[in-house]
Image: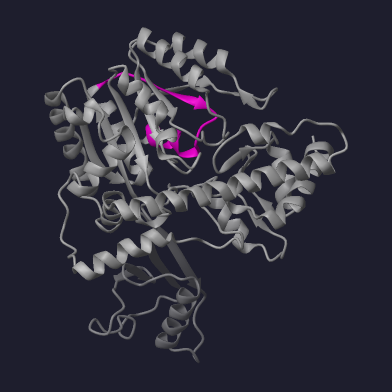
Amino acid sequence: MASTMLSLASTTPSASLSMQEILKMFMVWIRNFNCGFGQGKVRLGSGSVSTLFNKEKGNPFIKAKSSGRISMTVAVNVSRFEGIAMAPPDPILGVSEAFRADTDVKKLNLGVGAYRTEELQPYVLDVVKKAENLMLERGENKEYLSIEGLAAFNKVTAELLLGADNPVIKQQRVATVQGLSGTGSLRLAAALIERYFPGAQVLISSPTWGNHKNIFNDARVPWSEYRYYDPKTVGLDFEGMISDIKAAPEGSFILLHGCAHNPTGIDPTPEQWEKIADVIQEKNHIPFFDVAYQGFASGSLDADASSVRLFAARGMELLIAQSYSKNLGLYAERIGAINVVCSSADAAARVKSQLKRIARPMYSNPPVHGARIVANVVGDPALFNEWKEEMEMMAGRIKNVRQKLFDSLSARDKSGKDWSFILKQIGMFSFTGLNKTQSENMTNKWHVYMTKDGRISLAGLSLAKCEYLADAIIDSYHNVS
């Protein structure tokens, strides 16, 4: 083990100090410097003595002869992890940490995408409480799930995404494995790509959700970006997107946001989705959807899944990661799925077997609680209808906040700037167009916590706070370069 040597030397000890007293002083000095004696080495005069300084060994100094000078050396362990640097704070979750440390009463946390009530409190859906009560009444156990997860969950989640009557469901051409929410499901898919499509790259939108790059980097899957956001219009750079997808090497994986693009809130139109599908088919690419907001964006489960269903209807093989963090508010349950639509039932069975093989050494099997909640809600007609009503309520509140923010900006900004892009965006996020310096001003001056790319979560905003936020945005946009 690596060690550092600390030494203490003294001149000839005075007659008034015994060798034991000198040793006691030395031990106090060592303690003050947080040094242990587990591997101590003590040298006296011209001789040397090694000791563990424990009671069983006794004190070696009592019988030692002094040559007039005492020299003591102690080996101190140095961590084998000394070369590991401190990691930077997470750009999204770090926002909440900074928010909690702020004592200003006006502070707003618009960083993390988690739904809040008008009173800015966390919200547990009523339908979730009912589903949990059902679990208690049934006395369900906590036994391990199989590697692929809860069968009832896997069935309903694929049907919810693709439609129960979809031919790909009827023909058993979908390999579904329960994952650790959207992040874990994406990570499983990334591992599948790395293992069975060596050298293939993933194209991700610029910008995209902050964790996408981390996931592919950790899976050692090469990625590049396609143009998506146009800062001039604060809208979609559709021509740039199409051009970059066309230019990608044949057989690339194209990562698409199924609805409510994060972080921009800018989605392609139905006509644009058709064109995107055309180009992907022409280039023999593989579409890879991240669906984190089904039903939470528009309030309609079917409308928010229309892009995925379009690609499946064309007979394309595709990957889809799902999450129930937003639409059921199951943030901490880590419940989601990876679905792989294949050209045959045989291919789907083989893909599923390999996804299970990847999952086994990664986390063995997924948690059951969230899976049972989803299975109960989606599988029960009464609870399912109640869930749709609650989703419409949550999506409606965000739409109202979006409208109020636009109205406040338009009324309070006298420059004539067009803020209508806010109304054209969809979902819980809005891309304000503020740069890093302007976003920092939002935090430092106005106590509005947000990511540095200018994204704000409207789910964390109340109608009562819209005017305050509008003032902060106007000040940051016009007075900070």
Q: Is residue 207 magenta?
A: yes
Q: Is residue 208 visible?
A: yes
- Image quadrant in which the C terminus is located: top right
Specify the farthest residue to the right: 414
* Residue 63 placement, left or right of 462: left
Q: Nearer the viewer, residue 238 or 111?
A: 238
Residues shaded magenta: 197-217
Question: Where does residue 345 sit, x and y in percent of width and height?
Answer: 14, 26
- Residue at 31% from the left image edge and 20% from the top image edge: 313
Please tell me in which quadrant of the rendered image residue 295 appears.
top left
Specify the farthest residue to the left: 346
- Residue at 46% from the left image edge and 20% from the top image edge: 273
Q: Nearer the viewer, residue 428 or 254?
A: 428
Specify the farthest residue to the bottom: 16
- Residue at 27% from the left image edge and 38% from the top image edge: 159
* Residue 458 placement, left or right of 84: right
Q: Nearer the viewer, residue 339 or 23?
A: 339
How many numbered marks are there? 0
Question: Where does residue 383 sit, x and y in percent of width and height?
Answer: 34, 55
Question: Where does residue 264 sit, x and y in percent of width and height?
Answer: 58, 33
Q: Is residue 232 magenta?
A: no
* Residue 459 placement, left or right of 340: right
- Residue at 19% from the left image edge and 63% from the top image edge: 142
